[in-house]
Image (cartoon, grey):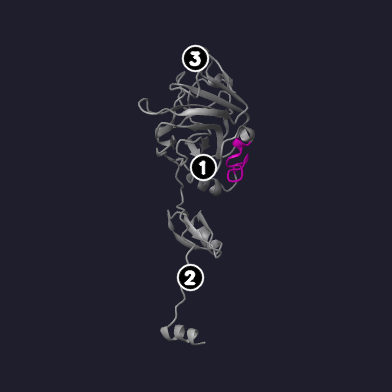
Amino acid sequence: MPRTVPVLTLSALSVFALATFATQARSGANAGGYLLLHTDDTVIYTEDDASSYCNELASECGWDPECDDDHFPCESALANLNPTSGRGPDTAMIWAIAAFPPESCPAVAAIQFGLTWPVSGPWPEFVDWNNCGDFEISTDYWPNGLVQGTAVTWYPPVRRTGFPVYWFAAYSYYGPVEIAVDDFPVGPYGLVFADDQVPAALDPVPADHRGSVGLNGATGWNPYTVSTPVGACCADDGTCAQITEDECQSVGGQYVGDGAPCEPNPCNITPVLDTSWGAVKSIFRN
């Protein structure tokens, strides 16, 4: 489990004293970033698999130290992250995902954030959790209480436009609850990314870049949007992928339309053969 320290100690220490001694917020490499919450009902939490939970988006959002790669596969994957679980009261896997526009060149050395949910109504229960960084320092009752938070650092900094910063296994037994990204509760900076400069530039995550996840009937929100519209693209074998119209045409697919989903699959349609009534009768005569 991550290290916890008293809130007063955190107040004096502050996370970004750990991450190259930042002194004030200013625009940096991580400007325009998002912090999303994502769930995947096909992943069933087990303690034995905990070491693999930080591998989310490994294939779609690769490392790009030179900032010259094509980031569209990552952009599309981020926009399609699911923020709503359908597992009812059962335990769901949740990831906190750092996300950036495809034209960005992020260098994430640290992040600090919190979680929040309505005070009235059901509260989530966290079964297990861990960070995806190199070092973590959190408040006393993180994540099982309100006005709590954690700070995670990386060395070297992460140079990907999308990657997991944290994972949780959680459930809401008594009814729907929406868990949302929130400010770090200690110090003046709130929810921010820090880069690898000295002193570090701190880039805040604005309110409309903060995601949420819905458990047991609640609906979450993914605020990340793609710069180029994507939609369902049907291949000859009936498979469907959400890509741009240009990409669909380049692989010889049939583009259904901007925003068209792949679930239900629009490509599994029984073909209709144009023919005449006379031709049909001749089949039966033979």
Residue 11 vs 280, above or below: the answer is above
Earlier sequence position, callout 3 versus callout 1: 3
| Label at residue 41 | 1
**Gap between marks 3 and 1 measured at Cα:** 34 Å
Q: Does residue 47 show up?
A: yes
Residue 174 falls left or right of residue 38: left
Residue 262, image x, y percentages: 48, 55
Q: Which residues are magenta?
A: 52-67
| Label at residue 7 | 3
Q: Are marks 3 and 2 in contact (CB under 8 Å)?
A: no
Residue 38, image x, y percentages: 49, 39
Earlier sequence position, callout 2 versus callout 1: 1
Query: Disc 3 vs disc 2: which is toward the camera?
Result: 2
**Gap between marks 3 and 2 measured at Cα:** 64 Å
Residue 266, image x, y percentages: 46, 60
On-image quarter of the N terminus: top right
Label 1 sits on a secondary structure element that is loop
Label 2 sits on a secondary structure element that is loop
Residue 161 vs 27, above or below: the answer is below
Q: Nearer the viewer, residue 82 or 108?
A: 82
| Label at residue 205 | none
The residue type indicated by label 3 comes to Val
Label 3 sits on a secondary structure element that is helix
Q: Is residue 200 covered in magenta? A: no
The residue type indicated by label 2 comes to Pro
Q: Residue at x 51, y 43 (%)?
A: 78
Residue placed under numbered mark 2 in the picture = 271
